[in-house]
Image: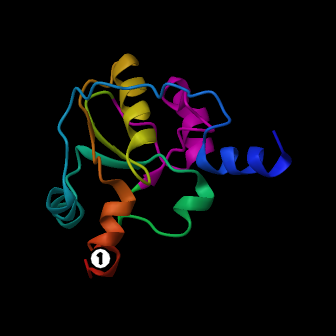
């Protein structure tokens, strides 16, 4: 096999062994764009919008009122004690009575974060499957709140 054939295989994704992506069962509500707009407008005190993208992604575009708790670099964030959590993320560690609505860029990391939260006792956890990509594609970033 020539070098260029290997390059073409890699480009097509054929050279690497196929890795099974984990699937997480959603135990909470699935929010859509309109639900998220309503949450941003109403700002319910018992609900936290948790963006699990990395800080460099979060700095580009945010859903108003959301907090950044990156899942990839800090998958055990909800295991931190209150002081460590607030020091690391800049907001108080949520109580288990709060509803946590997780989202990311396209929904995959949010699924993982929600599953991890449920395993840590945060049973009132939900997900915005469309995540930031859906928010931006529907011009949520242009809405004046």
What residue is rendered at 29% in x and 47% in y?
129
Q: Is residue 3 left or right of residue 110?
A: right
Judge left or right: residue 115 versus residue 138.
right
Q: Quadrant of the N terminus?
A: top right
The residue under the point 19% across, 54% down is: 32
Seen as rendered, the residue at the extreme right is: 3
Residue located 24% across and 63% down the image: 40
Q: Does residue 129 sit above or below 40 in this rendering?
A: above
- Whether 93 is among the magenta residues is yes
Give the extent of the magenta segment: 67-95
Q: Which residue is mark 1?
A: 139
x and y, in percent, of residue 137 in the image: 32, 71
Residue 18 sits in which quadrant? top right
Q: Nearer the viewer, residue 45 or 109?
A: 109
Could you tell me which secondary element the residue under label 1 belongs to? loop
Residue 67 % position (x, y): 44, 53
- On screen, residue 114 versus residue 87, left or right, reads left
Q: Position of residue 10 (x, y in %)?
A: 69, 45
> Is 79 one of the magenta-colored residues?
yes
Query: Residue 132 falls in which quadrant of the image?
Result: bottom left
> Dot 1 surroundings within 10 Å: few (below 14), some, or many (20 or more)?
few
Q: Is residue 44 left or right of residue 15?
A: left
Q: Where is residue 133 drawn, in percent x and y?
A: 38, 62
Q: In which quadrant is the C terminus drawn?
A: bottom left
């Amino acid at each position: 096999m020539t070098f260029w054939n290997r390059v073409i295989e890699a480009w097509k994704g054929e050279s690497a062994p196929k890795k099974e992506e984990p699937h997480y069962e959603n135990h909470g509500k699935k929010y859509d764009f309109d639900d998220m707009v309503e949450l941003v407008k109403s700002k319910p005190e018992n609900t936290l919008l948790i963006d699990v993208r990395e800080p460099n992604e979060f700095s580009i575009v945010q859903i108003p009122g959301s907090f950044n708790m990156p899942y990839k670099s800090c998958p055990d964030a909800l295991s931190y004690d209150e002081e460590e959590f607030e020091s690391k993320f800049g907001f108080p560690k949520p109580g288990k009575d709060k509803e946590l609505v997780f989202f990311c860029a396209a929904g995959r990391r949010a699924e993982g974060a929600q599953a991890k939260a449920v395993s840590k006792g945060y049973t009132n956890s939900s997900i915005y499957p469309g995540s930031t990509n859906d928010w931006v594609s529907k011009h949520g970033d242009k809405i004046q709140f």
